């Protein structure tokens, strides 16, 4: 939960409001912490929560909780966890009633059931029963699939973890946030999300952003002094409250309230979350509105025609409603949910977790990716290489100074807990092992924690002789500019290390008084002691991952706080030889229009702050396309929110993970490419169902409307239309198992309602043509009565609209050049066989079917073949007229106005960071 201390990061303070913590605004309050189902704990006796604890001295609060400054024992913590429950406010759970409501809320289904009830009262009870059973089966089928998808989402949420550094058994250790109990002593560092309500015991320049609770945008200065009884929540300076963010400094506090008893939990428990729509959901809604208009026009015209022909009112109403249901792909939500759930399981196996299933499709839309280089292009396994002294010091002394200058707590094995990767690499190096003994007797008496403007950390250390020295460690540029003199040999050494793509931290010192509070004003007149050099070599497979992303149409740009020479060298080694470079100082000289032009030819953005990162992402979005940002630090949170798709990793800081849509279990661009491919495959499969359903359903319902004009009876009974629709939709539930053609995932694809409308108008009449051919055969050749006519058209329409999936699922001509999945093949053929066999089953009489002549089935088989041939011809003409290019992108701000603009209005605009050399 600490922010890396290095010369490779250049962040500024992050201030986030409530609706910035997670995608979906208020939902964020309900979902953090959210790894287990919350249980309402019994409030610990004598604490009264944060408000009461803040009025008592810290020592008294510890005594009331039965704790010490060294924390609890592991056994006592386990006992309290059993008594008071996990530290969780809410979790994502699959709720049966909510999923069932999603299936039942269709107004068409409600009207159909109402009409069925009316028909039962007027004597048509068998028809009413059949309609009721079919509707129940349709709802049940959708419910089962959507509930499975919700269970998948629940399991994904359980995999996103948050950890905190606590004192247990007198030593620091990391534990799951949900395992915190009242009495635990918790360490707070820059960028941490406060995991529970804490009574502060120690603070060092601690400030917390509390807008999540109070709405105040400015951070609040914290101290350990008690406050008056009745003090407002926004003025509890002696407490750090759950869900707030450590803006600067560090601190230590004892847990006084967890879960639903924390102030955060009390608010979250009374709120109902509403997640905003993604572009994918907006596209589905717009598509649904298209179907509403078409269904409304057809239903109204058919009802008017049948009433004008003096057919029974109930029959006309049921038939019209059945037509409306028939043209509506009732199982589209189930198909989408099943696709997303199946995709999320596949992505999970590929080490990609999504917080919301619909974010999978968003990932497939990405065409520009901004990413840090550490851990993505480089191995992320930082090793300490050497200490480079300057005149008058030794390598051993530089190493000892680097070991002393750290924010991390050191456990009983001498390892830092909760520190940053550079400190961990330094302490675990073989060189450090021989120097640890030399640290004995030196005592750290003051600390000025790392922050994003200074980009360094300072400590005051007193040796056994009573001499106190200030030690500063951080980014070379910021440390060197505070030194009184920098030898030319040190500058040349620094340039050589940067040219070799090594990460470098500078260490400097100066005498300091033994007492007094350490501030940034003390970091002056330093003497450079030397450089600490770390190695983070490029990944062996990074070049191949970059090439793969390029084949997916994704442009990769590097956004890093590291030195520009280091970043450019790494990119060059990985094949990005034409990488243009801009630094944070360069960005400060460009207005937005100039930056938009510059980004086209820039691959590396180096020495940039969090605001720089967010600005780059916003400007890139203005140029068109969907933008993803991959980051893992608190300094990445603003950019993660600014992007269309925020991506983080499981080892990231809590703020970064909460800001992200997608979590990678492995920080690897190859893993990300797998996720992008899966997102595009899911969208391709969804579009297969949409194109097939709209064209064939529109054709069949148009045929029904036309047949009503000349037939003396209804073309098909309402129950038969519903059964046809149910069987047809059931066969399409296997679409999520289908593979996508290479050309379908090569480029991003977006919803294009105009394209869907053209496809429906083009291919629907082809379906109607064969329907009318069936009518002619039934009436002219077989002289069919009403029952036989119903049966014949039922079999033919089910066969044509089901089997056309093999042609529509691919743009390849002929369609057998693209092989469908085995489940899709078996279900499509099985449904057609089942429909053809229904007239000879005992259900035939109940459903109003009649035996058909054997020669009719041969005729239908021939018509299906001709139908598929005509569809192939239609595909060739259609795609020539509308070549398979990327559909038009949504208008600027389309998704962002829905998902992000509201959140950006709540992100405090921070002062631009001081420029560095």
Image (cartoon, helix red, strand yellow):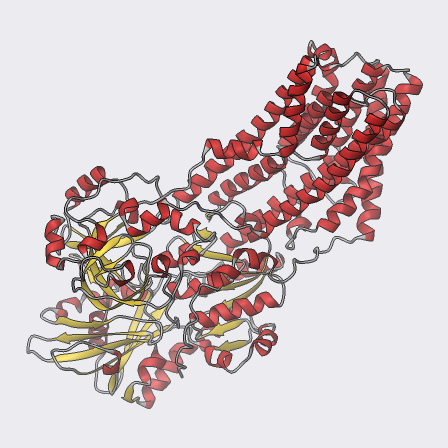
Frontmost residue, 895 versus 343: 895
Residue 526 point in image, percent of width and height:
24, 85
Tell me if I can see residue 886 in this picture. Answer: yes
Q: Tell me if residue 627 comes above or below residue 336 in the rendering.
A: below
Residue at position x 63%, y 59% in the image: 553
Residue at position x 75%, y 31% in the image: 801
Q: Farthest residue in the right direction?
A: 780
Residue 499 point in image, percent of width and height:
43, 78
Tell me if I can see residue 863 in this picture. Answer: no
Which quadrant of the view contains residue 432?
bottom left
Residue 92 point in image, percent of width and height:
42, 41
Q: Tell me if residue 6 comes above or below residue 333 in the rendering.
A: below
Residue at position x 49%, y 48% in the image: 275
Q: Tell me if residue 64 comes above or below residue 594 in the rendering.
A: above
Indicate the quadrant containing the N terminus: top left, top right, bottom left or bottom right: bottom left
Residue 651 lies left or right of residue 355; in this view the side is left
Which quadrant of the view contains residue 379?
bottom left
Frontmost residue, 806 versus 159: 159
Frontmost residue, 389 versus 568: 568
Which quadrant of the view contains residue 735?
top right
Residue 398 lies left or right of residue 616; in this view the side is left
Indicate the quadrant containing the C terminus: top left, top right, bottom left or bottom right: bottom left
Residue at position x 28%, y 49% in the image: 262
Callout count: 0
Residue 87 lies left or right of residue 44; in this view the side is right
Residue 206 point in image, percent of width and height:
25, 67
């Amino acid at each position: 939960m600490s922010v890396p201390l290095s010369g490779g990061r250049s962040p500024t303070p992050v201030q986030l409001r409530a609706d910035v913590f997670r995608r979906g605004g208020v939902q964020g309050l309900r979902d953090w912490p959210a790894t287990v189902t919350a249980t309402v704990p019994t409030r610990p006796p004598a604490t009264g929560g944060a408000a009461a604890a803040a009025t008592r001295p810290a020592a008294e609060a510890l005594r009331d909780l039965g704790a010490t400054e060294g924390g609890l024992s592991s056994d006592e913590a386990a006992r309290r966890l059993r008594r008071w429950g996990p530290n969780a406010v809410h979790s994502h759970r699959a709720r049966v009633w909510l999923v069932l409501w999603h299936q039942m809320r269709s107004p068409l289904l409600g009207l159909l059931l109402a009409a069925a009830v009316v028909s039962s009262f007027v004597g048509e009870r068998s028809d009413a029963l059949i309609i009721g059973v079919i509707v129940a089966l349709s709802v049940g089928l959708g419910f089962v699939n959507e509930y499975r998808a919700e269970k998948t989402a629940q399991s994904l949420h359980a995999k996103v973890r948050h950890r905190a550094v606590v004192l247990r058994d007198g030593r620091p250790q990391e534990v799951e946030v949900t395992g915190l109990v009242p009495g635990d002593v918790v360490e707070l560092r820059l960028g941490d999300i406060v995991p529970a309500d804490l009574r502060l015991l120690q603070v060092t320049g601690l400030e917390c952003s509390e807008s999540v609770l109070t709405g105040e945008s400015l951070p609040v200065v914290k101290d350990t002094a008690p406050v008056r009884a009745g003090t407002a929540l926004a003025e509890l300076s002696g407490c750090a409250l759950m869900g707030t963010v450590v803006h600067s400094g560090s601190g230590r506090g004892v847990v006084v309230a967890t879960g639903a008893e924390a102030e955060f939990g009390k608010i979250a428990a009374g709120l109902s979350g509403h997640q905003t729509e993604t572009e994918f959901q907006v596209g589905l809604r717009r598509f649904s509105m298209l179907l509403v208009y078409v269904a409304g026009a057809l239903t109204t015209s058919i009802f008017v025609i049948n009433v004008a022909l003096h057919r029974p009112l109930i029959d006309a109403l049921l038939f019209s409603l059945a037509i409306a249901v028939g043209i509506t792909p009732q199982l589209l939500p189930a198909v989408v949910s099943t696709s997303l759930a199946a995709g999320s399981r596949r992505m999970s196996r590929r080490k990609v977790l999504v917080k919301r299933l619909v974010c999978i499709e968003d990932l497939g839309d990405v065409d520009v990716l901004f990413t840090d280089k550490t851990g993505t292009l480089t191995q992320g396994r930082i090793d300490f290489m050497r200490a480079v002294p300057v005149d008058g010091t030794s390598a051993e002394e530089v190493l000892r100074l680097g070991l002393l200058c750290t924010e991390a707590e050191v456990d009983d094995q001498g390892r830092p807990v909760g520190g940053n990767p550079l400190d961990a690499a330094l302490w675990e190096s073989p060189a450090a092992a021989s120097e640890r003994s030399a640290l004995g007797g030196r005592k750290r008496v003051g600390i000025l924690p790392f922050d994003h403007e200074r980009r360094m950390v300072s400590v005051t250390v007193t040796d056994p002789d009573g001499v106190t020295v200030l030690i500063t460690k951080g980014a070379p540029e910021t440390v060197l500019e505070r030194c009184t003199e920098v030898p030319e040999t040190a500058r040349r050494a620094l340039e050589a290390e940067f040219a070799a793509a090594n990460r470098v931290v500078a260490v400097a010192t100066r005498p300091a008084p033994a007492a007094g509070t350490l501030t940034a004003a003390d970091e002056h007149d330093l003497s450079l002691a030397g450089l600490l050099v770390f190695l983070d070599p490029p990944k062996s497979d990074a070049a191949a991952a970059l090439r793969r992303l390029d084949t997916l149409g994704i442009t990769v740009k590097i956004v890093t706080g590291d030195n520009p020479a280091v970043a450019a060298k790494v990119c060059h080694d990985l094949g990005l030889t034409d990488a243009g470079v801009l630094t944070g100082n360069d960005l400060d000289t460009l207005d937005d229009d100039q930056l938009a032009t510059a980004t086209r030819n820039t691959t590396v953005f180096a020495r940039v702050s969090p605001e720089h990162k967010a600005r780059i992402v916003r400007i890139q979005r203005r140029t068109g396309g969907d933008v993803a940002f991959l980051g893992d630090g608190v300094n990445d949170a603003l950019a993660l929110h600014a992007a269309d798709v925020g991506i983080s990793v499981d080892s990231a800081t809590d703020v970064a993970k909460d800001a992200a849509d997608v979590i990678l279990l492995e920080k690897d661009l190859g893993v990300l490419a797998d996720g992008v491919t899966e997102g595009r495959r899911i969208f391709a499969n969804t579009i297969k169902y949409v194109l097939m359903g709209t064209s064939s359903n529109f054709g069949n319902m148009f045929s029904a409307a036309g047949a009503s004009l000349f037939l003396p009876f209804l073309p098909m009974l309402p129950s038969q239309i519903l059964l046809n629709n149910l069987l047809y939709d059931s066969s399409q539930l296997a679409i999520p198992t289908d593979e996508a053609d290479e050309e379908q995932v090569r480029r991003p694809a977006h919803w294009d309602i105009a394209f869907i409308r053209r496809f429906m108008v083009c291919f629907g009449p082809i379906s109607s043509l064969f329907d009318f051919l069936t009518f002619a055969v039934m009436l002219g050749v077989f002289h069919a009565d009403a029952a036989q006519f119903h049966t014949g058209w039922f079999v033919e329409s089910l066969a044509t609209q089901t089997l056309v999936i093999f042609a529509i699922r691919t743009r390849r001509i002929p369609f057998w050049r693209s092989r469908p999945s085995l489940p899709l093949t078996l279900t499509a053929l099985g449904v057609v066989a089942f429909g053809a066999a229904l007239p000879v089953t005992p259900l035939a009489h109940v459903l109003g079917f009649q035996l058909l002549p054997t020669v009719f089935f041969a005729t239908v088989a021939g018509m299906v073949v001709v139908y598929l041939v005509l569809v192939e011809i239609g595909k060739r003409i259609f795609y020539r007229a509308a070549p398979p290019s990327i559909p038009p992108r949504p208008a600027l701000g389309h998704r962002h106005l829905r998902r992000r603009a509201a959140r950006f209005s709540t992100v405090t605009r921070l002062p631009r960071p001081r420029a560095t050399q």
